[in-house]
């Protein structure tokens, strides 16, 4: 399973996946910074990504995911500091283990 961390997610959160079987990439390391959501989603399809982790709460209003195979985790946090988001990653990894259905999953801690 290929996971993409959106540009609003600290790149160091990739380390939370070290002991998992998932291939995790960041928007930054793929040189996809600043790309609009529609094009980002298309690039994810073109590169066989399965999961996007983001803090963009408006994504569901901007894109139609009804016919998509992507699973989008939207982290409902008050900031994007690594210490705030680390607990969210534990929840995300637990959900990923259960092979979630495609669509948007709101994650709270």
Image (cartoon, rainbow, N blue to C red):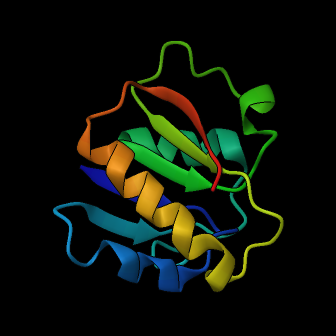
| Picture coordinates of residue 20, whole percent (x, y) | 20, 66
33 up-or-down from 61: above or below: below
Residue furthest front as drawn: 109
Which residue is at a point 42% across and 26% down the rendered structure image? 102
Q: Visible in this render: residue 48?
A: no
Residue furthest left as drawn: 21
Front residue of 109 and 19: 109
Quadrant the C terminus occupies? bottom right
Which residue is at a point 65% across and 20% down the rendered structure image? 64
| Picture coordinates of residue 34, whole percent (x, y) | 73, 65
Front residue of 22 and 69: 22
Residue 54's image quarter?
A: bottom right
Q: How many marks?
A: 0
Q: Visible in this render: residue 92?
A: yes
Which residue is at a point 58% across and 22% down the rendered structure image? 65
Residue 55 horizontal side relative to residue 72, left or right: right
Residue 78's image quarter?
A: bottom right
| Picture coordinates of residue 62, whole percent (x, y) | 78, 31
Front residue of 108 and 80: 108
Which residue is at a point 23% across and 60% down the rendered structure image? 22
Residue 88's image quarter?
A: bottom right
| Picture coordinates of residue 30, whole percent (x, y) | 46, 72
């Amino acid at each position: 399973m290929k996971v993409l961390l959106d540009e609003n997610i600290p790149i160091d959160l990739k380390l939370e996946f070290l002991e998992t079987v998932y291939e995790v990439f960041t928007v930054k390391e793929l040189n996809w910074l600043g790309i609009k959501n529609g094009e980002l989603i298309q690039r994810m399809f073109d590169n066989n990504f399965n999961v996007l982790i983001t803090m963009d709460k408006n994504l569901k209003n901007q894109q139609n995911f009804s016919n998509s195979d992507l699973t989008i985790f939207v982290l409902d946090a008050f900031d994007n500091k690594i210490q705030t988001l680390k607990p969210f990653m534990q929840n995300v990894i637990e959900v990923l283990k259960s092979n979630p259905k495609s669509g948007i999953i709101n994650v709270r801690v």
